[in-house]
Image (cartoon, grey):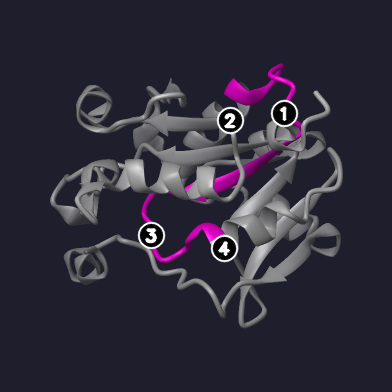
Amino acid sequence: MTDDEDQVAGLLLAAGGGRRLGGRPKALLEHRGHPLVEHAVGVLRAAGCARVHVVLGARAADVRDRAVLEGCVLVDNPDWEQGMGSSLRTGLDSLTGTGARAALVSLVDQPGIGAEAMARVRAGFRDETSLVSAAYAGVRGHPVLLGAAHWAGVAATATGDRGARAYLREHEAEIALVECGDVARPYDIDTEADLVHLE
């Protein structure tokens, strides 16, 4: 594929069960009148990702019923309770062989990170060896762009809730940091107190 839009796929991790939210799956939390997963897909699309894979886990059937996710590839992670690492592995596996040369990895529970920040990180894509990360006041955060050459290495080290953290720490020198603190707020929706961030 030569079309740049197809080279960078959006990968949305939306499997979490919201343990600290009384067991409410984060994907189904309401934000601006829509389920959070729907909002997050829209952000990836607005950032230029024509292809979006969404990893579902907790109450996946309800998410499919209630969210409008047309055109997305929906991937079930049966091991979602093991943490974000298993969802990242599942998502990268679903992209293997699709022609995508990089994955722009986004988390469903970070609605303060909008299309502008996503597009900045996506613009850092050069080839399969690219590693690009948003930074907030110089500190690495999400989203992260993982070139396809790194997928196997990330998958091998993604355990528990650490996601790509261990791999990225080992490859710190290769990561291009893109400052996004001026256009995004990287808070997570983890607890009842965090729900104030939803509209």
N-terminal of the pair, mark 3 or mark 4, is: 3
Quarter of the image for the N terminus: give it: top right
> Could you tell which of marks 2 and 3 lies nearer the N-terminus?
2
Q: Tell me the tag on residue 111.
A: 3
Foreground disc of the pair 4, 1: 4
- The answer to the question of whether label 1 and label 2 lie on touching residues, with beta carbons closer than 8 A, is yes
The magenta stretch is 94-115
Q: Quadrant of residue 197?
A: bottom left
Q: Nearer the viewer, residue 90 or 130?
A: 130
Figure check: 74 above or below 43: above
Q: Position of residue 152 (x, y in %)?
A: 73, 31
Q: Which element type, helix, strand or loop, lies under badge 2?
A: loop
Residue contact at pointers 4 and 1, CB within 8 angstroms = no
The disc labelled 3 sits on which kind of residue?
Pro
Q: CA distance from mark 3 to mark 4?
A: 12 Å
Compared with 109, 16 (above or below) is above
Foreground mark, 3 or 4, reads 4
- Picture coordinates of residue 163, whole percent (x, y): 55, 47
- Residue 41 sits above or below residue 174 on the image: above
Which label was assigned to residue 116?
Answer: 4
**Residue drawn at the location 68% of the way across and 19% of the way down:** 98
Q: Position of residue 128 (x, y in %)?
A: 84, 38
Q: Using a 10 Å C-alpha cutoff, classify the residue at mark 4 as few (fewer than 14 neighbours), some (14 to 19) or many (20 or more).
A: some
Residue 71: tell me if it is visible.
Answer: yes
Q: Residue at x 46, y 24 (%)?
A: 71
Q: Residue tagged by mark 2?
A: 51
Q: Amino acid at mark 1?
A: Ala
Q: Earlier in the sequence, mark 1 or mark 2?
A: 2
Answer whether labels 4 and 2 touch (C-beta < 8 Å): no
Instruction: From the image, tell me which residue sits under label 1.
Output: 100
Amino acid beneath label 2: Arg
